[in-house]
Amino acid sequence: MFHLFQFGGHNRPPTFGNGLLFNGLLCVFFALAILAAPELLAYFVAVILLVIGTSMLTAWWKIRK
């Protein structure tokens, strides 16, 4: 997610290759973990909801200021 933000005076377009690789590997890892222990699905959903909620609150805070 942080690879989308550009700090400094870089005039090059953002690269999505590394982010896609990391997210793809993360999805495969979580899928294998859920297949190995299905009760992990509840934890995975809870983490996703926490990340989305925190992102929305951060975006709201940034827009407000």
Image (cartoon, helix red, strand yellow):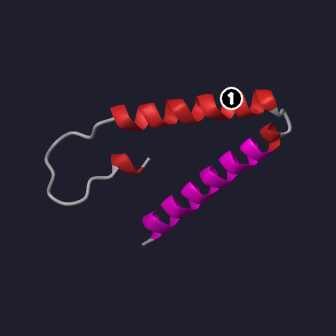
Q: Nearer the viewer, residue 35 or 2?
A: 35
Find the residue positioned furthest to the right.
39
Q: Nearer the viewer, residue 59 or 24?
A: 24
In the image, what residue occupies the spot 55% across and 55% down? 55
Binning the other alpha carbons within 10 Å of mark 1 as few (below 14), some (14 to 19) or many (20 upward) gives: some
Q: Position of residue 9 (x, y in %)?
A: 14, 57
In the image, what residue occupies the spot 44% across and 47% down? 1
User: Up-down: is 64 above or below 46?
Assistant: below
Q: Is residue 61 magenta?
A: yes
Compared across the picture, whether 36 is left or right of 12 comes to: right
Compared across the picture, whether 32 is left or right of 5 comes to: right
Question: Where on the picture, by quarter, is residue 39?
Answer: top right
User: Up-down: is 43 above or below 64?
Assistant: above
Q: Nearer the viewer, residue 62 or 48?
A: 48
Task: Give, as a three-letter code, the residue at label 1.
Answer: Ala
Q: Main secondary structure of the magenta part?
A: helix
Q: Which quadrant: the C terminus?
A: bottom left
Compared across the picture, whether 53 is left or right of 42 comes to: left
Q: Position of residue 36 (x, y in %)?
A: 79, 29
Considering the numbered disc 1 on the image, is that residue within a helix, a strand or a loop?
Answer: helix
Total of numbered circles in the picture?
1
Find the residue positioned furthest to the front.
36
Q: Position of residue 15 (x, y in %)?
A: 28, 37
In the image, what residue occupies the spot 57% across and 62% down? 57
Question: Where on the picture, by quarter, is residue 45?
Answer: top right
Q: Position of residue 59 (x, y in %)?
A: 49, 59
Q: Which residue is mark 1?
A: 31
In the image, what residue occupies the spot 69% across and 50% down? 47
Residue range (magenta): 43-64
